[in-house]
Amino acid sequence: MQENRKTPLVSIIMPFYNADPYLEEAMDSILRQSFADYELIIINDGSTDASESILKNYNDERILYIKQVNAGVASSLNTGIELAKGKYIWRHDADDTCLPDKLEKQVHFLESHPEIALCATQIAFMTDSGKIAYSFRQPKKEYFNNSAYVIVEYAHFNPYSPITHATVLIRTAVMKEMKGYRTAFKTAEDVDLWLRIINGYKAAVLNQCNYFVRLYKTSATAKLGKRNEFYRNLALKLYQIRSKGEPDFIEKGEPVIYATCEEEEKFFDKGCKVRTDLLDFKYPLYLNAGDLRGAAKLAYEIIRDGWKKGITWKLLLFPILGTRLVKFLVRIKSIFR
């Protein structure tokens, strides 16, 4: 650990666990930022891959490297918060990338808006090979209604959080007042934090798309599955309790008991399972990004599980044929009925 570190304006926290396929790309993305007054706190959460050897190739006095026994995301982030010296904190994921002016724009925004505690930005999704699907953004452009930014409200968290975790630049004083992330949340720890913050502060989402979130099978979101939904709903429920002026049960020291959801049926007729989990989002996203190899792999899974269902083939073809052609074919079909 480096001692007597300089006091930067921004503390960037990047926790990771076994991130060697994408770590170098994420690091380069951070070090290319046009705003240079930051420290980069890297927390190796017990990785067993080659991540550490990749980090040894970087020699930058702004980097503080911490290695710890695996403790999970929330705990790792809290370690970074304790070490942070900057006026602002930005958490960057070890498998994502961003544009060089991202940090500069957000620092300028918060410096110009002292009444706002944090600002996030819009993101675009990218495939595991790094191809960006610019048409797949979150929040969608309609959310902004042509405004430069939107002040976040509780209602905006339905159906998804408008705040993407890794885009957030937050005032360190507010983060420490909140005592960081609550480790009772195994996932959705960020949603819980944002909802606690907007109980008493303003949060904004900027109408700027300058951060790219990578989708891949072994990401935390993919691995945690239905737990994401459970913990997200829990965060919403606890917000409602606090809104009545009462402490939520985590604040009271009560434990969170994960209510296991019944797994999807494991047994189904071969070829009769429609893979809406892939067809509704990931498959069209890969096509939009031009990642044809990745789309082909997804198509194989979709056909393997649902080839007997006509809807499987329709949903596979719609993104390829395009909306206009599909509408034209529907019209033709209606004429001959």
Image: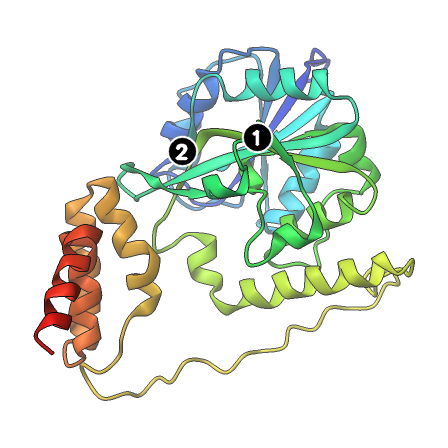
In the rendered structure, the answer to whether residue 154 lies left or right of residue 29 reads right
Query: Residue 299 occupies which quadrant of the picture?
Result: bottom left
Query: Residue 274 occupies which quadrant of the picture?
Result: bottom left
Q: Amino acid at mark 1?
A: Ser
* Picture colour scheme: rainbow
In this rendering, does residue 156 appear at all? yes
Circle 1 residues within 10 Å: few <14, some 14–19, many ≥20:
few
- Earlier-in-chain disc, 2 versus 1: 2
**Which element is circle 1 on?**
loop
Circle 2 residues within 10 Å: few <14, some 14–19, many ≥20:
many
Q: Position of residue 205 (x, y in %)?
A: 60, 35
In the rendered structure, the answer to whether residue 259 lies left or right of residue 92 reads right
Q: Position of residue 279 (x, y in %)?
A: 28, 63
User: Which image quadrant: the N terminus?
Assistant: top right
Tell me the mark number nearer the camera, choosing from 2 and 1.
1
Name the mark on residue 147: 1
For the point 41% across and 80% down, the residue is 264
User: Which image quadrant: the C terminus?
Assistant: bottom left
Q: Amino acid at mark 2?
A: Leu
In this rendering, does residue 94 appear at all? no
Q: Residue furthest left?
A: 336
**Which element is circle 2 on?**
helix
Residue corresponding to mark 2: 23
Whole-angstrom CA distance, mark 2 to mark 1, is: 34 Å
